[in-house]
């Protein structure tokens, strides 16, 4: 299936992902974050929510479920959409406009523990997760989505 990345002829793309949450043994809210390490192709040490490029023919919810499983190794139940963030980036000489759609998700089952783009998948308490994603100022400002999530009453 063709990925819906922006390109020279159509510089608009979109991604889907989510806030996967659970309560820890102390009753504190945790979210699943991914750590992406520096490589020859990625100049940053960054934490972010699981997300990725949607494919042609997928709904946004289907893309979020697939990407979370591929990137974080968890099968999830998508509960509801929480919002979207817009970002821009450059690919070669083309400015790409991207929208990322986020969903609130519950983990169903741990499927795997490895993803090639990330060196760590970790459950992190919500306030700490907000700090970690805010420390990476490029692309989507995911702390906005996490702060919106913080206002939801979770039972």
Image (tube, rainbow, N blue to C red):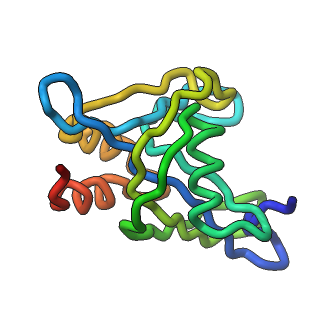
Looking at this view, is 44 or 57 the one in front?
57
Q: Residue at x 18, y 40 (%)?
A: 127
Where residue 110 appears, as percent x and y from the top left, is 53, 28
Q: Position of residue 39 (x, y in %)?
A: 65, 26
Q: Residue at x 36, y 66 (%)?
A: 82
Query: How many marks on residues?
Result: 0
Residue 35 against residue 54 in the figure, above or below? above
Taking the image as shown, residue 135 lies to the left or right of residue 148, namely right
Q: Nearer the viewer, residue 80 or 56?
A: 80
Q: Quadrant of residue 26?
A: top left
Q: Nearer the viewer, residue 110 or 140?
A: 110
Left or right: residue 51 compared with residue 63: left
Q: Closest to the observer: 85 or 151?
A: 151
- Which quarter of the figure has residue 114? top right
Above or below, 138 against 131 in this view is below
Q: Quadrant of the N terminus?
A: bottom right
As drawn, the residue found furthest toward the bottom would be 10
Q: Position of residue 122 (x, y in %)?
A: 40, 26
Q: Going 60% across and 67% down the picture, which residue do you hit?
A: 60
Side of 142 relative to 131 (left or right): right
Q: Name which quarter of the figure residue 135 lies in.
A: top left
Residue at x-position 15% and y-position 58%? 153
Q: Check the image and report above or below for 46 versus 100.
A: above
Left or right relative to 4: residue 33: left
Q: Position of residue 102 (x, y in %)?
A: 45, 61
């Amino acid at each position: 299936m063709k990925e819906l990345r922006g390109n020279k002829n159509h510089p608009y793309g979109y991604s889907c992902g989510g806030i996967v949450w659970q309560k820890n043994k102390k009753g504190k809210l945790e979210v699943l974050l991914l750590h992406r390490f520096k490589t020859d192709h990625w100049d940053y040490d960054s934490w972010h929510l699981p997300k990725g490029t949607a494919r042609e023919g997928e709904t946004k919810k289907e893309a979020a479920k697939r990407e979370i499983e591929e990137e974080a190794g968890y099968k999830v139940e998508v509960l509801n959409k929480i919002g979207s963030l817009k970002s821009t980036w450059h690919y070669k000489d083309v400015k790409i406009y991207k929208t990322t759609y986020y969903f609130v998700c519950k983990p169903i089952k741990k499927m795997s523990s490895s993803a090639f783009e990330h060196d760590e998948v970790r459950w992190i308490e919500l306030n700490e997760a907000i700090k970690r994603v805010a420390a990476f100022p490029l692309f989507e400002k995911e702390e906005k989505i996490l702060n919106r999530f913080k206002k939801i009453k979770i039972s």
